[in-house]
Image: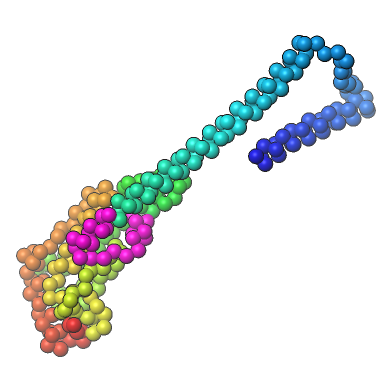
Amino acid sequence: MKKDWLILVCCVGLFSSGFVFARLLAQFGYLPAVFFVWEEKLDIGTMFNIVAAIATALAAYAAFRSADTARIAAMDSRASTRIQTYIQHQQQFDRLLDESQAEMGIAFFRRIELYDKMFPDNRHADKSFSLLADPTVILNWANRYDQLRDIAESELPPIEESFPQWMIGCMELANRMNFTHMEPKEGQVYINGRNYSYFDSDPAKPLHNLAEVIHRLARFGLIDRAPKILFHRHMPAFVTAYNSFYWSIQEGRTPHKII
């Protein structure tokens, strides 16, 4: 409304300044004198023309205001639709995480941060909303999992001193996907005697969780990436070496502890 009044005042001022400038030029002889002649008598035709001109001006202004109002309403409608779409999509994402927690015994943290990692543009109203997750994020998770899986699946298992680093790699990948494994009730390995690892005597469960979480998040983001899930039969050499490592901890031959 203030903008409309400003435009009106500017127009009136421009018209007035033009009239004054023309009178000055006429006074100095550069333009013929211009005078307004007002008829003392107004006929019906003249009055009709005046009323019609005023009505036309009012109609033009009303049309301008109507178009401006429609434009603002359309923008508000689009913004509202965008917000509702964002909220509904995030609610579906939360349901996926809830189901994963219940079925896998894991816990997600900072869920909005995880959503923004996968869909970085969706919270910005000036960017296109997308159901497709950022493929580079999913690919980075999957590639890191493949590196950890290759170690476990290899016929040449790591030496005992390398197992803590492998376990830390599994924890770091889970942290990048904003989840933690369920802590074992007993028998958990504490690296260097103080840092929990979520690993007990079975190394397959945390690795299985990593693959399953990547698969579920990728599927929600409409990306076809299903990492290979390992079971004991896929990594016999690794399981044998891990059992030896676990036994060494129990015997007190390492700086690690089992609680």
Q: Nearer the viewer, residue 168 or 156?
A: 168
Left or right of 83, for residue 157:
left
Q: Residue at x 32, y 52 (%)?
A: 91
Q: Position of residue 56 (x, y in %)?
A: 67, 21
Q: Position of residue 231 (x, y in %)?
A: 10, 64
Q: Is residue 151 visible?
A: yes
Q: Residue at x 85, y 31 (%)?
A: 21
Left or right of 236, for residue 108:
right
Q: Quadrant of the C terminus?
A: bottom left
Number of numbered discs: 0
Position of residue 146 relative to residue 91, above or below, is below
Q: Is residue 96 magenta?
A: yes
Q: Quadrant of the N terminus?
A: top right
Say how the picture is coloured: rainbow
Q: Magenta stretch mostly in which secondary structure?
A: helix
Position of residue 17 relative to residue 134, above or below, is above
Position of residue 207 relative to residue 193, above or below, is above
Q: Is residue 169 magenta?
A: no
Left or right of 119, for residue 25:
right
Left or right of 33, for residue 57:
left
Q: Is residue 173 visible?
A: no
Identify the image quadrant of residue 55: top right
Q: Position of residue 164 (x, y in %)?
A: 21, 77
Q: Residue at x 18, y 68 (%)?
A: 206
Q: Residue at x 22, y 59 (%)?
A: 100
In this picture, which residue range is highlighted in magenta? Answer: 95-118
* Outermost residue, bottom side: 252
